[in-house]
Image (tube, rainbow, N blue to C red):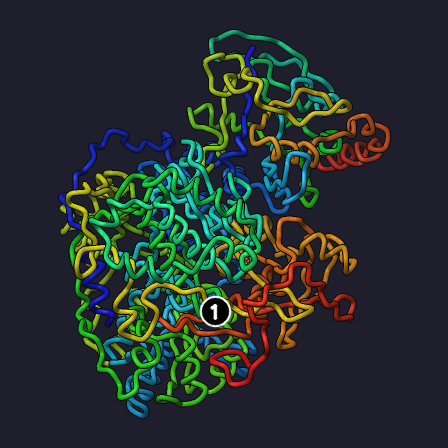
Amino acid sequence: MSQLAMVIDLNKCVGCHACAIACRAEWSVPVPYRRNWVKRLGPETTAKGLAFTFYPGLCNHCDDPKCTTVCPVDPEERVFKSKDGKTKKISIRATYKDPFTGVVLVDKERCIGCGNCVEACPYEARYLNEELDDPRADKCTFCVERLAYNLEPACVRTCITGARIFGDLSDTTSQVSKIVNSGKAVRLQSKEVNIGPNVYYVGKDRDILLLQQSCTPHERKWENVMAPMRREILKAAIKRIAKVV
Amino acid sequence: MKRRNFLKLSASACAALAALQLGDKDIFRPVQARSAAEAPKLPGSLGAKEITSVCEMCFWRCPIVGKVKNGRLVKIEGNPKSPANGTRVCARGNSGVQLLYDPDRIKYPLKRTGSRGEGKWARISWDEALDEVAHNLKETKRKYGPHALAFFDHGASAEFMRDIFKTLGSENYTNEPAFFQCVGPAALAYLMTYGYVTTGTRQYIDMKNAKAMLFIGTHIGENVHVSHVREFIEGLQNGAKLVVVDPRYSASAAKADIYLPIRPGTDTALLLAWMNFIISEGLYNKEFVEKHCTGFDELKKAVKKYTLQWASPICDLPVRDMKKAILLLAGNSPHVAVHPGRHSTWYGRGDTGRHQALAILAALFGAVGVEGGLYFPTHVKKGHISFGCVEEEPETPAKSISEDYYPFASTFGSPTSKIIEATLTGKPYPVKLWGINGVNILQTISNPYHTMEAIKKLDFIFCEEILPTETAIWSDIVLPGATYLERYDTVYTFDLLTPYLTVRQPVVKPMFEVKSSFWIARELAKRTGLKCFNYNNEVEFIEEELKGAGLTLKELNQKGGIVSYKANPYRDPKEFKVATEDGKVQLAVEDFADEDLDPVPKFVPTPAPPKGYVRLVYGRSPVHTFSRTMNNKWLHNEAPENLLWLNDKVAKKVNIKDGEEVVLENQDGYRSWPIKIKVTPGIRPDTAYMVHGFGSRSKQLSKAYKQGASDQFLVTEYEDDPFMGASSHRTNFIRIVKAGKVINLPELCPPPKDIPRFVPQKNRTGGK
């Protein structure tokens, strides 16, 4: 089974923010929401020396995504097709992990805009534009829509130094799997939040250390979602029904 | 040297070569919708109509494609056929969409109704606006003579209007802040050493193939020009070692092998000590120096007194670190990229000298015309066009602003500081009318308070602008210019490592009543009675330029909007020649000596901060260009304000916390708008840093107004570079005002006795 993944090379990244804006343009993501971001870290003293680096972030398309588990929408069976024609039938809620690409997506037709998945993501990679009458959760898709036309993700296409390497981890010849298999790449995960993110980072020791110290999530946000959000779910459902009626 | 000599020089420096056109192997095929009805349904920018053009979010001008869906520009990408950037554009390039659709844009010609600077306007017709500008140009010239007209210019939009001022006979037809507030000293130093402007708009430095690189204050990555950044990163990836000298731990410093946190204002001391070291240790490239340089003995003698031990307390750097760095650089010669720098108007005295020292150091490494060193431009042929404007230089007045203050100013035009002085004092002659195009002068030129006073004295001031900047709100007439996405310009050639020829063309139709720069200049010329701009439209002269390259616009567009050529950057040592009079690199510049200036740079200390203050330095954010992009919706969202970097030990002593909002006060008592503090070990205790261009004072820039602090409005003290008259910007000092209380900052690295302390003086060249 495939798993699309990205490696971001902080030795090449200069923190120019082109990725964040190309994504915004490609998918008309309204300000101030974002699917893709750059945070500037440092200069700060680390155990490995003075570091000044960046956190280019996006959805991690996790191995064990928690956002998909908190979706209150009734599951529905769907048949997924792989590139080589294989099919697989699985039951999905309004947000799900594609069994053939490993990409975590939102079914915009069925999303009720309750915001549970937004709350659940420990990486804060999702958003809900609450200014809209009928908001739906939105997030990075690894540009699967572009991949269908053999085009790279928008952030990869614009990255001025080629710091973003994108590919399939199951393909051992791909550059991403070579880097990941070399053991040099790190992911932003902790003892508490250990859900297999598929965005990896490589860089100088001091930069990786600063990145991990500043940006690794520790809060199991998904565990706190259901109860306090129930009222919101109800409100969203009523809004939708009212609209239909 | 006169401007025409300079132009001749740079032309001869571009050794012409028969351009070899690359085959069209990678034909550019965008995702096409199968039908017009399908296009809007495709996701994202897929299926958009693609039009090739050229970016102008900064002056680097990357080739782009505009992606248009339903008549609306949805996205900008790099032109995949561009050998320089390919599909890539930076954050600003990506955000051109939001310049085009900025709701604050100037939509119609405007006439001031309130007082200057108030920003009260009435909408007028193009006829009224152009007639009024033309009338004032003619009247001012009739009353005070041609030199009473002055033009402040920058970028592509200014290129046409410049000819009007020149044809009207003003010697002040160009006083580009790009030179006099930015690159001038560096450009002059390299021009005199190597005979061509190694660092001007373009920078001919081969970082990609270098084995070692040296940056003095250069912060590539925060300063983004796509192909330049790419070559820097490629060089590092290829294993090049990097030495960065900077009082601040910049994005470049963070990638360095050796980082030297130098005391501001002492870079030349370090460079001179390094030169002396490699000369006395015999580590310089003797063969290169003997064969291709003149003035070595003079250089050797002049730098003899500068030892590493002498430099150490001045630069506040340990001898062993300085030695380690120079050994690393010398050990990799000749493949050493000694970056020539760009913004060099730092301290006034000594600015040209510092860049001359960099130029000399490169020659001592033999790092010229070889892989990894300074290289030669590749001339790309295009047709010469004449707009029928006056081509010879205007007559020089009895006392000339351009020629009589600073010996090398006229190489670049008239010094901005002297135009402002003449406007304020009427000396050496009155300047009564300003035209401005492509530059926000109040956020660019040292001491904006002087600039505002000068504007009040003018008979007339007009500008062509896209947004209601400070410059616009101080103008009598504002002409709404088309953005680069709505107009044609001249044909662009790129003469760096990846040469190409391309053309800017409109991606969408002009919005509102905006007009192209060519149209505006042509109309103004007509109404001023000048026989100028004898083409009906841009396409006519573009075709003529393309004819010289053996192309038509249609053919160029069929090729994907761009044609690449083979580069010729290096030279066989046997044929090595630079464009100076004797064909050799000038290690001592006799032309400087002829003007009673130092032929070999000397260390001239810039005054240290007064007690209680730290030096204010500034730089760039990768998401902003000068003060031009702070109102851009997408860029504003990435970086809405600037922060003041303050050393962590200093902050601790005065109990200032990270994120606290304060006001800054400079040595002359001028205060900034509120700015948040960033506490970091990444800056020296005697220095504070902020990104340039924030703190807009125009209320009509709804997003940028009052966001962060303006460095420019704290630069009230300046000195002119004695060589070419550029104004200094890093000669100002700040302390902090927190909750109304003035806080003096502790001095944690006091200057040695050799460096005098700043004393406020009356009647200086600049300042109060």
Q: Secondary structure at mark 1?
A: loop
Q: In the picture, residue B643 is in which quadrant?
A: bottom right
Expressed as whole percent of the image width and height from the top left, the position of residue B508 reads 38, 51
**Image quarter (top left, top right, bottom left or bottom right) of the C terminus of chain B:** bottom right
Q: Which residue is mark 1?
A: B728
Question: Residue B690: image x %, image y %?
Answer: 59, 58
Quadrant (top left, top right, bottom left, bottom right) of the N terminus of chain B: bottom left
Query: x, y percentage for residue B37?
Result: 41, 35
* Whether residue B68 can be seen here: no
Question: Is residue B495 shown left or right of residue B760?
Answer: left
Query: Which residue sits at x=54%, y=83%?
Result: B115
> On the picture, is B186 further left or further right than B473?
left
The answer to whether residue B122 is above or below residue B646 is below
Q: Percent from the top left, x then y, of residue B418?
A: 40, 79
B418 w.r.t. B279: above or below:
below
Disc 1 residue crowd, few under 14, some 14–19, many 20+, Cα 10 Å: many
